[in-house]
Image (tube, rainbow, N blue to C red):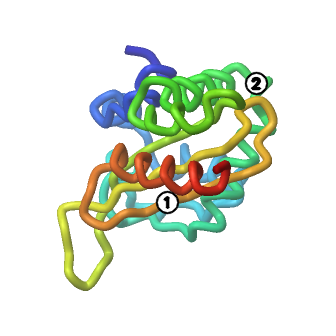
Amino acid sequence: MNLTSAIAQSCNSYFRMLAADLSSSNVSPTATRFGLDPPPRTASGTQLIGLGDHWRTSPLRMARAYVELTRDRDQFAVNQIVAGMADSARYGTAAAVHGVLRSVGALAKTGTAACTHRRGSPGDGFAIVLTPADHPQLLLLVRVHGVPGSHAARTAAEMLHRIEG
């Protein structure tokens, strides 16, 4: 497994290994560059990859960070991330999006994050979809209570179908 396939399949174990020796000071410059608040100084590697609820950001900041990411796709590492997002939308955890946006393509990332609802669940599914894949003009961020990210991607696909419909 490499970075591109780990993104396409939303493989937490790959990202845990990648972040095992990371500290907040390693991540802070990149977070700031993409308009995100830096993580807490005490954040562990697991928390730095989004597992747990110690490092939060607003949906607007997250959306802006993804837009900025797509603008930097000519950089090698960013290109691998964007390729993983394209693969996620085609056949990965966000494959439901492909059926709706087959002609224009999409970039997508799914994940499951800590639930913050009063009536808690093991986690909430998230999906972010940017379309068209080559030059995104639309960004959709979906959160669904109590389901994994792949289910949130199905909800996003249904919403996009109504928009495109």
Please identify the quadrant where the N terminus is shown: top left
Q: Where residue 100 sits: x, y (%)?
A: 56, 38
Residue 44, above or below 59: above
User: Is 72 left or right of 121, judged from the image as shown?
Assistant: right
Q: Is residue 49 visible?
A: no
User: Is 15 left or right of 64, judged from the image as shown?
Assistant: left
Q: How far apart in space, not on screen, are marks 1 and 2 (Cα)?
A: 27 Å
Residue 57, above or below 118: above
Under circle 2, the secondary element is loop
Please rate how many residues cluster around mark 2, counting C-alpha atoms within 10 Å: few if below 14, some from 14 to 19, many from 20.
few
Q: Residue at x 55, y 47 (%)?
A: 27
On residue 94, the disc is: none
Q: Which amino acid, by three-letter code, is at mark 1?
A: Val
Residue 163, above or below 109: below
Q: Which residue is mark 1?
A: 142
Q: Residue at x 71, y 32 (%)?
A: 133
Number of callouts: 2
User: Is 99 left or right of 32, judged from the image as shown?
Assistant: left
Q: Nearer the viewer, residue 163 or 30?
A: 163
Q: Where residue 7 sits: x, y (%)?
A: 46, 30
Q: Residue furthest front?
A: 165
Q: Is residue 82 visible?
A: yes
Q: Nearer the viewer, residue 27 or 68?
A: 68
Q: Which residue is mark 2?
A: 75
Which image quarter: residue 16? top left
Q: Where residue 17 sits: x, y (%)?
A: 32, 29
Of the residues under marks 1 and 2, which one precedes in the sequence?
2
Q: Which amino acid, by three-letter code, is at mark 2?
A: Gln
Which image quarter: residue 8? top left
Q: Residue at x 70, y 19 (%)?
A: 76
Q: Nearer the viewer, residue 146 or 158?
A: 158
